[in-house]
Amino acid sequence: MNIVFSDKRLHLPRNRGNLVFLIGTLFTIMILTMSYRKIDTMVPEGRNQQDNEEYEYQMKRLRENEFPKSLHHNIKYSPPTYMAKFQWAMHKNYLPNYYTRRDMSTANRWPSDGFYSNASVVFVDNHHSGGGVMKDCMSAIADNSSLPKPTLVWNNNVGKFYTNMKGGGSNQILEKLYLGGFTFGVCDYTNEPCSYFTVIREPYERIIASYVYCKGKEDLPCQVRNAKGKPLSLKDWALRQGSFFFRQLLHNPEVCGLSYLSRIEELRDDNDPSAVSMPCWYKNKLILDHIMTKQEKAQVLDFILEHLETWFSVVGITDEYDTFLKILQHTYKMPFEKMCKETVEKVVFKRDSTDYLTQSELLYELKRELLSDQEVFDALYHDVRIYQKIQDIFVAQKEIFFSSAQNSGHNLIGHGPDKNR
């Protein structure tokens, strides 16, 4: 028996039994092919359980550039031309805001919860914004979870840390926890999920707290507080520190290494410490003030404001540190609130404390003194703008977080489901 297709000849078996078997086999293959195509387009019912299979599947999607570039944790795009001068600030690896910048268009959020809970977690510490509390908090979480102590990246080890990181290549296996004032950039040394979070203080209040703390202190962040042995005034300290967080987001790790010592020595004022003993934050300030015009600072500020929600998975403000802990705990599935709430109440909110900074009248007077000064305003302007933006993001995070808790009845805020629902 022959069937002819064009000039091709298909020979079918003459035996009827064999013919029936062949037709049945072909029909079965067709049905299975159609079924697999249908299954392949379905979302697995267990996807929201964040198991290992889903994690590997989504990692594959990331590597294949399947999810929207505006949300991609490893983004490659054409930066604004004005950023070409600041290539070190063009970070490539991060997870977007857990609440405000994830793709909600499908039944499953993207990136998934598993990306955040499995990611390396990097805390960017803005000096005198409750960072000491977070350091203790993350150390306690590490002990509780049998994790290594958080890796500290601070004034005294910045150059060495990033020299070692650079030598290890761009796809390293990172530790679980990092913290410090110079951690923004750690995630660029891996292709695996890596997440930044931060908490900042209102800039004028941060300057006052920093000024009071540094009286008589010899900590590295405080070592440019004196000029020829004479303590600086509050205004002078504000002008010297300036927009501290703005520069943290622009820090070039090489500035704090050996290769920049001679350059720093040329730029420093006679009243400044030597380049060898100068804290990293001040080295960074000298370089940025030297290479950036006023227009470039304005352009880079706009770039930062546009990318805060993309760079940071969670942001917080010290005025609502307790809520910030709840949000961190839900995001990373780590016991931030459980283990740190009591410390925050004592240290950040200073309940039952006689610390004179908690006396609102004095704080108000010092703040009013700074607010009335145009030079101080200009110095803190970039941080004020960033703080305002982070406030807006925090409010949006909080609304989504509490709305999700209320609607789902899940234990998102440290309480069980509402029994009256």
Image (spheres, grey):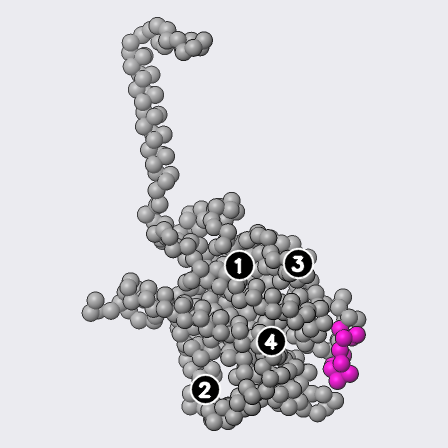
Q: Which of marks 1 and 4 is nearer the N terminus?
A: 1
Is 327 situated above or below 30? below
Is 292 situated above or below 227? above
Residue 350 circle label: 2
* Residue farthest toward the left in the current orientation of the protein: 420
Displayed quadrant of residue 99 = bottom left
Residue situated in front as seen by the camera: 296 or 64: 296
| The magenta stretch spans residue 338 | no
Is 114 situated above or below 132? above
Give the magenta range: 264-274
| The magenta stretch spans residue 270 | yes
Quadrant of the image for the N terminus? Answer: top left
Q: Residues within 10 Å of mark 1 (few under 14, many from 20)?
A: many
Quadrant of the image for the C terminus? Answer: bottom left
Q: How crowded is mark 3: few (under 14 residues within 10 Å), some or many (20 or more)?
A: few
User: Which residue is labeled 1 in the image?
Assistant: 94
User: Which residue is labeled 4 in the image?
Assistant: 244
User: Which residue is labeled 3 in the image?
Assistant: 84
Q: Distance between the residues labelled 2 and 1?
A: 34 Å
